[in-house]
Amino acid sequence: MNAFISYSHHDAEFLTSLHQHLAALRRQKLLETWTDREIDAGGVLDQEIARAMGKANLFLLLVSSSFINSDYCYEKEFQNALEKQKAGKALIVPIIVRPCDWEIPELRQFKALPEDGKAVHSKHWHSADEAFADVVKKLRTLIEKCKKKRENFTPDESHVSPEQREELRTVHDEIVKRLIAKKANQEEDVVKAEYGKWAGIVWSQFHEEFGTKTSGLQSLDHLRFAEAKSWLQQYRASNDKKLKRANPQAYRVTLTKTIYSLIKPLGWTKMDLYSFAAEKINYAQPISSLNDLGNSQLELVRDRVRYEATKKKAKSAQAKAERAPRFDEPTSPVAQELLELILKHPNKEEQGLTEILRDSPAGALFRSFIPNTTAAGAAPSVKKSLFAPAVAEPVSLGWLLQPEGNHAVRIYELNPDARRSPP
């Protein structure tokens, strides 16, 4: 497990002792720990801390009056830990190092260590070593329990299906091939080694984003499938430029293959595709082959065909499930609010949502968006941990189509068939 240790610098001596007592768990590769002592000179504190919190799936809080009094420890680090815990991405373990009033509901809800929450620095323990030995003993039990649960994990209907997992693997494969484009013409063993390296990097980032590191892709909640696929597609799109620069011809071949694969579920012939392409790029003359088009034109055709395929897939999935034409309402309060903002837009052609992928003015933990597809108007901000599942829910329910976009924005169009169920 990856543990982030949050502490007040007034309690630095307790951090040192705890770190020493955790040595056996670290040597057994059962636990990796991080504190701000890991930041090298010149490192940007907020960025390094945010990166470490993003990787953590266990938060150890060294609780004292100093910790509770610290805005950074309590309002930033603890609140971030709470968000991850509520999303099922992390565990929180308070460790009471000094006697203090910690009767705060959002903190008190977690079982504290040492035993019964008796502070390390108190008469209950003969020494700090005795108290921390109790802490580590119970942490070991927790970690081994999580490990056993991971090893015995069995997916069910609440997790992504084998077909959905295969879809995600296909997009992942495309990403990795783009990343190694420069070495595609080298020796086979070099290509394989490079592929393996980047495949691991991409999956590692994916698992950190979706909390599936412990049990793998099979443990992904089916409600987050659309969000996960969109994340991979955006990752893939961000690497298109690398492939384009490294090997324009390979990029062109990839574009062409993608377009032909997209027309299969649409039931289009090649002539249907050529007619559609001519219309979308405003060609006055008929197109007899995709070879007639440049790479930028192929990109446009790919995006528009993908959009048509997404619309058909959404309708097909709805019919297959024999659902009523009226859609279920989102259950998340944030998803409900987003949907209301989208439906209030006066122009039906512009109903949707524009997600702004660059850094939010509200901070690294926030995501800005605009409730229309034209990116016009004010851009409110929402915490990323709330925004991502809030968008994924209306996508999974059929309200929003799969997004299109680039490295700067992601656009979700309202499904033309979206209607509310009767009250």
Image (tube, grey):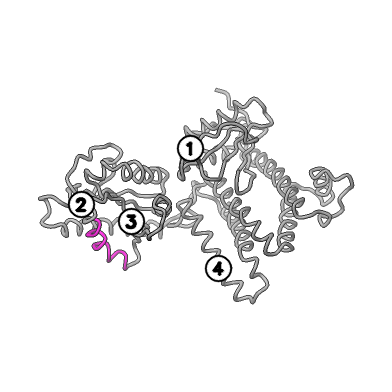
Residue 381: % across, % down: 50, 36
Callouts 2 and 4 close, C-beta under 8 Å: no
Q: Amino acid at mark 3?
A: Thr
The residue depicted at 51 percent of the width and 55 percent of the height is: 206
Mark 2 — residue? Answer: 114
Q: Secondary structure at mark 2?
A: loop
Mark 1 — residue? Answer: 382
Say whether residue 175 is left or right of residue 70: right
Magenta segment, principal secondary structure?
Answer: helix
- What crowding class fits label 3: few (fewer than 14 Cα within 10 Å), some (14-19), or many (20 or more)? some
The residue depicted at 60 percent of the width and 76 percent of the height is: 189
Frontmost of labels 1 and 4 is 1
Q: Amino acid at mark 4?
A: Gly
Frontmost of labels 3 and 4 is 3
Callouts 2 and 1 close, C-beta under 8 Å: no
Quadrant of the image containing the N terminus = bottom left
